[in-house]
Image (cartoon, rainbow, N blue to C red):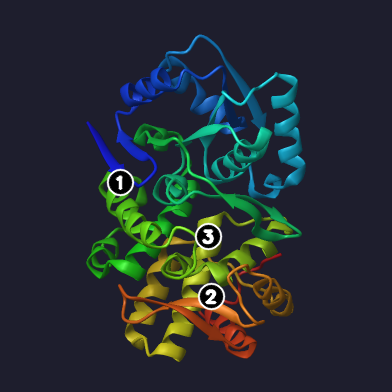
Amino acid sequence: MIQTISLQNYTIHIGAIWQQWNALLHSLQPSKIVVLVDENTRKYCLPMFSENTNFEHFFVIEIPSGEQHKNIDTCQIIWSKMMDANVDRKALMVNLGGGVIGDMGGFCASTFKRGIDFVQFPTTLLSQVDASIGGKLGIDFQEVKNSIGVFANPKAVFIEPHFLDTLPAREIRSGFAEIIKHSLIYDAQQWQQIQAITDLQQVDWTHFLVPSLRIKQQIVEADPYEKGLRKALNFGHTVGHAVESYFLQSERPLLHGEAIAIGMISEAYLSYKKLGLAYIELEHISQFLLRIYDEVIIPNIAFSWLIEMMKKDKKNEQDLINFSLIHPIGKVHINQTSHWVEIIESLHFYNELIPQTIITN
């Protein structure tokens, strides 16, 4: 079974995608296929891709997995290998992996020789429900997430749900955070369904893929360049990105969704304080997220560093820290600014929910 979501410039194919993939290849007739993988997708996903791709030869570039490698140094490795392989402007780049592969591979493709075509093959739950729509590509710079990048659309996105079978439980949890976010900002009914989930290993994720993608589709098509409404998708991310950057420097880095879960609790608290989100709703959000995600205390000594990172967020204007907050659940309000004192209060709120016996880096 195949489902499609048609955007203005490309189509997302979900399900049994191989016929559509080979049809696109036939129409494009690329001079070469460059497949970007990490060590995990090379082992678990590349065999399925190779077996189902009707193309005589493709060139594989492997980079190390992890957000800590999403930087200009890795881009230089990718560009150098493409140059050494005589990749021309009629080549097609395939980004076979999660959000890091999709963001960085798309960025490298869009800038190599002023741009070559690329397609996205997201292989993680996170990338399938979130990063595959919107054309936002980029890398981290000076510890600020996604601060260097471009807007560019792929030729198509191909979502093969069977890739999720290769993922560890922690990666599934990470991706679930974006489904939770979409529900909190846009779909109160789906939030009610989500709260009934007790075992992530028993969830049929295809049930959530299309609804989440359609939520993001509506928002992105209304605001492709993040001038207004698209900021709604940043709920949980202003605090969450800063927390993710902080723990990248620790012995136990957090996955994106794990940091965003912390961000959603903190920003739900700000929604309660600033917009009047009902305290019972704040409790439900906090309790559910803490049931799903590991308990991680944020050291108080990190608060000032986190505030400085939030000040560097690309969504800010005039030195104000910008948030997208919710009230009620299912409705989001963009361009809500908060003072650093209120933000630290929200971090304290989060920490106080965690048993103080938890030891962190």
Question: Pointers 3 and 2 in contact (CB under 8 A)?
Answer: no
Residue pictured at 53% horizontal, 67% vertical: 237
Please name the residue that numbered disc 2 is placed on. 354
Query: Residue 18's quadrant in the figure?
Result: top left
Q: Which numbered disc, 3 or 1, marks the residue that appears first in the sequence?
A: 1
From the image, which quarter does the C terminus lie in? Answer: bottom right
Residue pictured at 61% horizontal, 78% vertical: 317
| Disc ID at residue 202 | 1
Work out how far the residue at label 3 is from the one at label 1, CA to CA, in angstroms.
Answer: 20 Å
Along the viewing direction, whichever of 179 and 24 lies nearer the viewer: 24
From the image, which quarter does the N terminus lie in? Answer: top left
Q: Residues within 10 Å of mark 3 (few under 14, many from 20)?
A: many
As helix, strand or loop, the secondary structure at mark 2 comes to loop
Along the viewing direction, whichever of 254 and 309 lies nearer the viewer: 309
Question: In x, y percent, where is residue 249?
Answer: 74, 58
Query: Residue 108's quadrant in the figure?
Result: top right
Please state which of the two labelled residues, at mark 3 or mark 2, is closer to the viewer: 3
Callout 3 amino acid? Glu
Residue pictured at 22% horizontal, 67% vertical: 189
| Disc ID at residue 274 | none
Callout 2 amino acid? Ile
Work out how far the residue at label 1 is from the one at label 2, CA to CA, in angstroms.
Answer: 27 Å
Please name the residue that numbered disc 3 is placed on. 258
Q: Which numbered disc, 1 or 2, marks the residue that appears first in the sequence?
A: 1
Query: Residue 43's quadrant in the figure?
Result: top right
Give the side of residue 205 with respect to residue 75, left or right.
left
Give the side of residue 14 with respect to residue 121, left or right.
left
Residue pictured at 39% horizontal, 21% vertical: 27
Along the viewing direction, whichever of 226 and 121 lies nearer the viewer: 226
Work out how far the residue at label 3 is from the one at label 2, CA to CA, in angstroms.
Answer: 15 Å
- Which residue is at the far top? 56
As helix, strand or loop, the secondary structure at mark 1 comes to helix
